[in-house]
């Protein structure tokens, strides 16, 4: 099935999707930071690639990626409507994510990518251990 909107209208709709203050990702990670005494992070740092959080002193960039949008198949969710569009959209996002990660790493940064599903209560213990391991003494 084709998209019910033309390309211009679809672009307009998608431009309204915000990537900041997302309750299922960024705000949950802030809660995890606070509950576990993880400090020293900054948000909205003006750098190409727009990491969700940075630890400037340690040169660590954290990206919290929505599973569907960034190609994680934890839920194996694939829309049947307009499948070609969504496949291409996810592939572009994954390519962009890889380019941004490589760009940070070339400048000597450590990049941590966290999947949305890792923020769920059943997965948090593993995430907290991973964060403490990767962040060290924060």
Image (cartoon, helix red, strand yellow):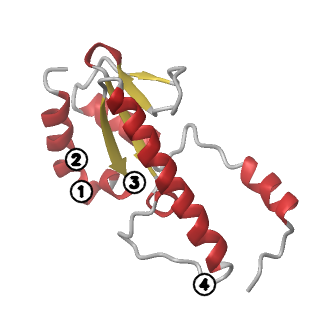
Residue ID for mark 2: 127
Q: Are marks 1 and 2 in contact (CB under 8 Å)?
A: yes
User: Marks 1 and 2, how far apart in space?
Assistant: 6 Å
User: Marks 4 and 3, how far apart in space?
Assistant: 22 Å
| Residue farthest to the top, as pictured | 57
Residue ID for mark 4: 80
Residue ID for mark 3: 116
Q: Badge 3: how crowded within 10 Å, few (<14), some, or many (20+)?
A: many
Q: Position of residue 111 (x, y in %)?
A: 32, 35
| Residue farthest to the front, as pictured | 106
Viewer-nearest of discs 4 and 3: 4
Residue visible at 39% across and 63% down? 72
Is the residue 15 above or below the residue 108 in the image? below
Q: Position of residue 1 (x, y in %)?
A: 73, 86
Q: Badge 2: how crowded within 10 Å, few (<14), some, or many (20+)?
A: some
Q: Nearer the viewer, residue 75 or 61?
A: 61
Among numbered discs 4 and 1, the one appearing first in the sequence: 4
Is the residue 81 above or below the residue 71 in the image? below
Q: Secondary structure at mark 3?
A: helix
Residue visible at 52% across and 59% down? 69
Is the residue 40 above or below the residue 94 in the image? above
Among numbered discs 2 and 4, the one appearing first in the sequence: 4
Residue ID for mark 1: 123
Q: Secondary structure at mark 4?
A: loop
């Amino acid at each position: 099935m084709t998209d019910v909107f033309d390309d211009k209208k679809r672009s307009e709709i998608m431009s309204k999707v915000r990537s900041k203050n997302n309750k299922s990702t960024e705000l949950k990670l802030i809660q995890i930071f606070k509950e576990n005494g993880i400090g020293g992070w900054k948000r909205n740092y003006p750098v190409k690639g727009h990491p969700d959080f940075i630890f400037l002193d340690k040169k660590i960039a954290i990206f919290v990626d929505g599973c569907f949008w960034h190609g994680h198949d934890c839920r194996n969710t694939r829309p049947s409507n307009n499948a070609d569009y969504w496949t291409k959209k996810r592939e572009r996002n994954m390519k962009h994510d890889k380019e941004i990660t490589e760009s940070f790493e070339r400048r000597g940064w450590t990049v941590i990518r966290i999947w949305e599903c890792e923020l769920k209560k059943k997965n948090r213990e593993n995430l907290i251990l991973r964060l403490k391991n990767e962040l060290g003494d924060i």
